[in-house]
Image: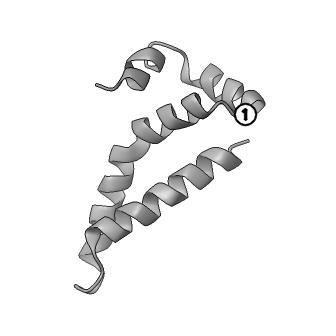
Amino acid sequence: MSRLLEKYNQLDETSLWKDYRLTKNKEIRDYFAQKYSPLVKHVAGRVAIGMPQNVEFDDLVRYGVFGLLDAIEKFD
């Protein structure tokens, strides 16, 4: 388990989101990105099933990570 997951997993997620919204702390952003990255991979896998074979799974994951980071930044 990564250092960030170990550090922030013990804290209340709602308060972490509030803290991130106020401070834009990059460490908290990175924690959320690491925490939700398995979900991105899961969704990319589901989407890949219906895509043409020339669409790479890794590309879907990359786009998903960009979307995740964008969603974290825009969280209100």
Furthest-top residue in view? 10
Q: Residue at x 35, y 70 (%)?
A: 59
The residue that disc 1 covers is: 21
Total numbered circles: 1
Q: In this view, does 23 lie to the left or right of 64?
A: right
Label 1 Cα neighbours within 10 Å, binned few <14 / some 14-19 / many ≥20? some
Residue 2 picture quarter? top left
- Name the amino acid, label 1: Arg
Q: Which quadrant: the N terminus?
A: top left
* Residue depicted at x 33% and y 63%: 44
Name the image quarter holding the C terminus: top right
Secondary structure at numbered mark 1: helix
Q: Position of residue 53 (x, y in %)?
A: 22, 85
Query: Where does residue 28 sit, x and y in percent of width and height?
Result: 57, 29
Q: In this view, does 63 lie above or below 27?
A: below
Of residues 43 and 29, which is closer to you in this image?
A: 29
